[in-house]
């Protein structure tokens, strides 16, 4: 009876161990905040519970990354631009795994100033047994700093409209920039500097009657435009 109980316990332990699909050295589900707009890299490593010959395959499940992010993905065997629907890694012999070789998926991102959040989910499995697998994921957070939020908004007021001689332009944003007034054909009529949260008065008394476009252009390249009528 004692031998039977010990054998039964060993069977349970071995079954529990076998039921573990993979082991993840760097976490199975990553949650990361981007710190560099030019390049970030995040990796998930995987091995089998005990060394064995294996070829990992993977399949893309969902991808909600910002389409303006420049992404590539690398695994044990190759790199791809963007996220392909599926791929197969190079085979890993059990001896190599015992020596420290692991499968991995590395997500490389260049976000630029395209702030936001996104998540990629990937199903990783044994190439010889699709049902033997787990889902891994990369959740990326790229928060816009307060300064960037301010820099990317231009708000303005123009009055009176219609105008006879003196046009008032108010910059309601804390962004330095310039005022450009053009006629309906795009000819530049006036150009003045406009400070952050400043008010500028422009003499338009010599303009012909008609429609003009007033643009406030920030140093960050963002701008707002409004049409005015010269009486």
Image (cartoon, grey):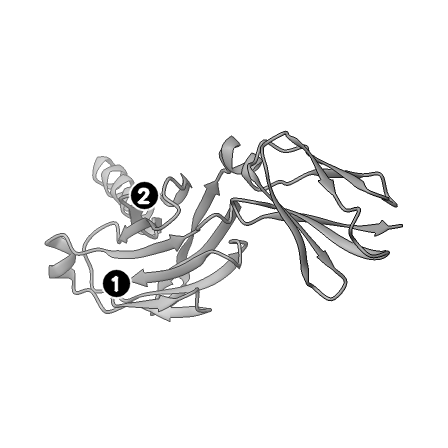
Q: Secondary structure at mark 1?
A: loop
Crowd class of label 2 (few under 14; some 14 to 19; many from 20; radius 10 Å): few
Counting from the top left corner in percent of width and height, residue 194 is at 60, 38
The residue singled out by tag 1 in the image is 76
Question: Does 130 sit left or right of 90 as displayed?
Answer: right
Q: Can you tell which mark lies on residue 65?
A: none
Q: Nearer the viewer, residue 141 or 19?
A: 141
Crowd class of label 1 (few under 14; some 14 to 19; many from 20; radius 10 Å): some
Q: Which residue is rendered at x = 63% and y = 29% of the image?
A: 197
Q: Nearer the viewer, residue 222 or 24?
A: 222
The residue singled out by tag 2 in the image is 12
Q: Nearer the viewer, mark 2 or mark 1?
A: 1
Counting from the top left corner in percent of width and height, residue 52 is at 20, 60
Q: Nearer the viewer, residue 143 or 90?
A: 143
Q: Secondary structure at mark 2?
A: helix
Q: Which residue is rendered at x = 80% and y = 46% of the image?
A: 205
Q: Which residue is rendered at x = 22% and y = 35% of the image?
A: 2
Question: Does 222 sit left or right of 95 as displayed?
Answer: right
Question: Does 183 sit left or right of 27 as displayed?
Answer: right
Counting from the top left corner in percent of width and height, residue 66 is at 53, 54
């Amino acid at each position: 009876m004692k031998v039977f109980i010990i054998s039964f316990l060993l069977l349970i332990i071995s079954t529990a161990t076998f039921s573990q699909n993979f082991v993840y050295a760097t976490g199975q589900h990553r949650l990361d905040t981007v710190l560099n707009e030019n390049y970030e890299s995040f990796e998930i490593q995987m091995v089998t519970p005990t060394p064995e010959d294996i070829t990992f395959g993977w399949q893309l499940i969902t991808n909600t990354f910002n389409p303006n992010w420049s992404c590539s993905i690398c695994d044990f065997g190759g790199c791809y631009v963007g996220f392909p629907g599926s791929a197969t890694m190079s085979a890993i012999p059990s001896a190599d795994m015992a020596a420290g070789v692991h499968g991995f998926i590395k997500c490389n991102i260049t976000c630029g100033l395209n702030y936001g959040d996104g998540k990629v989910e990937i199903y990783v499995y044994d190439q010889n047994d699709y049902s033997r697998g787990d889902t891994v994921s990369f959740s990326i957070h790229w928060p816009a700093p307060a300064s960037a939020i301010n820099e990317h908004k231009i708000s303005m007021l123009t009055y009176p409209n219609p105008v006879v001689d003196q046009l008032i332009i108010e910059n309601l944003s804390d962004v330095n920039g310039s005022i450009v007034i053009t006629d309906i054909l795009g000819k530049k009529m006036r150009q003045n500097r406009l400070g952050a949260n400043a008010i500028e008065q422009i003499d338009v008394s010599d303009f012909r009657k008609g429609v003009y476009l007033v643009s406030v252009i920030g140093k960050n390249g963002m701008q707002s435009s409004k049409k005015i009528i010269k009486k």
